[in-house]
Amino acid sequence: MRKYWQIAKGRMQENTAYSAWYWAGTASAVMRLLIIYFFWQAVYANQTTIQNINLETMLTYIVIAMLLQGFVGGVGNELAENIKDGQVAIELMRPYDMIFKMFAVDIGGKIMYLIQGTIPMLLIAYFFMDISFPKSPETILLFGVSALAGIWIGTFFDFLVGVLAFWTVNVWGVRVLKESLITFFSGALVPITLFPDWLRTITEFLPFQAMVYLPVSIFSGLISGTEAYMALGVQLFWLVSLYVLVRFIWSQAIKQITIFGG
Amino acid sequence: MITVENLKKEYKLVKRDPGLKGAMKSLFNRKYETKHAVKGIDFTIEQGETVGYIGSNGAGKSTTIKMLTGILTPTSGKVTVNGLVPYENRQKNAVNIGAVFGQRTQLFWDIPVRESYNLLKHIYEIPEQEYQETIEMFTEVLNLESLLGIPVRQLSLGQKMRCELAAAFLHRPKVVYLDEPTIGLDIAVKVKIRKFIKEMNQRWGTTVLLTTHDMQDIEEICDRIIIIDGGTILYDGGLDEIKKQFGQKRVIHFELADKEKFELPSALNGQVEVLPNEEETKISLSFDHEAVKSSFVISEMMSMYEIGDLNIADPKIETIVEDLYNKQEQGEEHEKVLANS
Ligand SMILES: Nc1ncnc2c1ncn2[C@@H]1O[C@H](COP(=O)(O)OP(=O)(O)OP(=O)(O)O)[C@@H](O)[C@H]1O
Ligand SMILES: [Mg+2]
């Protein structure tokens, strides 16, 4: 356990190595937040509700979704690079589990992002924007659990796409596809309730909504009560399925690497 | 201890016809080509041995080492390292081995070397005290002091290699594999690195398996060499033995006042060969030192010519190995001719 924590710390250190970029990251995060905030204010200029969602709920949803989306990615990219340039070979000679190691690296990166991106955005949102924070401790707790589940679902999915690099020539294409699928279907742009019915039905069968839409809906009150617990159930399903899939695909990839020589 | 029995590795390559048409064709109908990189080799290496593993480009050295580290799964045959099958117990095996691959870095790119070592300390669960001692010693032997604070990406090749080497030995592994650790380095760094490897071997009894194209590395570090060519082992034995066995040829270079008039003394006829020598005043004689004594050759020469200077060349492992490769090649060609006729 300790070694994985040290690996996470190593990544945190690496991320501070480029200190100019460190603050650029913060600036760009805050920028995006402002843009999205004023955009929705403008959308609501001529109406008080859209599909029964008022401005305050919408802003709450959008801002929290944006904060959460920052954690939904993973280290798939890096894994893909490692596989392509043969660096995995070195990794296979280390006394650790490569998947856990990559997760540790990811956690390190996310802790840095939390400090550099999320916390500044959250402070600005809290003090300067009209968003409503949940009142009941139960909702906060539910959101916490659901957000963590969403983050891990996103991480597993990203890992999965990364390992696919092993079988695909055009890694870049796969990644772009993945990014746009996630942005759209996870509900990071707009709440999925605004989708037309047929699209919503599709979305419900995909893992993406479990990454952002479900936890943020709990936070902003779009989902509550039994529905919230059902949402957690759906997330649990995806969490377990994706993890099993990650393990399986990874073991296949290792088999290939050690037979074909990378 | 390392044991290898009838170890084979075949690579499967997808065969592609050239051009777009070929690419399309290979989508539907994949043809594989098999490359026999290692063709059934055997050897045993005891704890504490220093073994040079040499052979020409593409001979199968790296492939063998990768199988020993567990990175590659053999096609067939047996391999164990300290009782473990590397490709089945990768993580357990990892604790007992260290490795340097000349072209790859295993340090973390963006953080200072010292932090990399610190991370390795945790990854290999090295006790703090042991770690401190090790670092102190490495710093001294490899002159790392000024490098420890610098991120790896800012180091020169030679500086990086010194750091890599320290990383490979940091957890005091039983076995260290070094795949071309001196590639592209200047003499001063090579000397430092050789000294370090030797010292680690003597101090901790670390088994060292080293591949290199620099025979000086072998002469200075290794007690034993294994020569591989085309995936099969040509020679396995002590460094001294190979010199005795194949290096009975001695060469003496004489500096003559007048080379034009040179003729081989009749007493040496049939036993001594005149080698081509570009230099105007020099003549080189080669002979089997079991059959003819050097002193006899010299005295014969001196009685007939005015000798300015002379120089007896040691049998160099380099020339021996070159001879071996050449013999093998000629043998192969010979076989081909036979097969064709
Ligand atoms: N991943 C791979 N896929 C297919 N063939 C490979 C692969 N790796 C090596 N080979 C082939 O196997 C043979 C042995 O290669 P290997 O890398 O073991 O040689 P080597 O002795 O280390 O050579 P060098 O001195 O050039 O490093 C070569 O013919 C090489 O082309
Ligand atoms: Mg090689």
Image: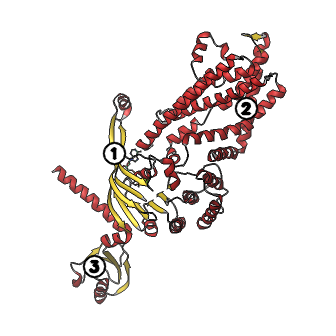
In the displayed structure, does residue B135 sit left or right of residue A134?
A: left
Nearest the viewer among A214 and B334 is A214
Q: Indicate whether B41 appears above or below B250.
A: above
Residue with the mark numbered 3: B290
Residue B213: image quadrant is bottom left
Residue A90 x/y as whole percent: 51, 48
Q: Is residue A39 visible?
A: no
Is B134 left or right of B233, judged from the image as shown?
right
What's under tag 1, amino acid-wise? Lys
Q: Is mark 2 within 8 Å of ligand 1?
A: no
The quadrant of the rendering that contains the N terminus of chain B is: bottom left
Q: Which label's residue is closer to the chain start, 3 or 1?
A: 1
Numbered mark located on residue A46 in the image: none
Q: Chain of mark 1?
A: B
Left or right position of A181 against A89: right
Q: Is mark 1 within 8 Å of ligand 1?
A: yes
Instruction: Identify the residue under disc 2.
Output: A29
Circle 2: residue type: Ala
Q: In this orientation, which residue lies closer to the viewer: A199 or B296?
A: A199
Q: Measure the C-alpha gap from mark 1 to mark 2.
A: 52 Å
Q: Quadrant of residue B10?
A: top left
> Which secondary structure, mark 1?
strand
Please give the name of the residue rendered at 79% of the width and 13% of the height, measured from the top-left corner: A45
- Looking at the rendered structure, the secondary structure element under dot 2 is helix
Residue A261 showing in the rendered view? yes
Which residue matches tag 1? B35
Q: Chain of mark 2?
A: A
* Residue B115 higher or lower than B280, as above or below: above
Q: State the CA–CA distance, disc 3 to disc 1.
A: 42 Å
The amino acid pointed to by label 3 is Glu
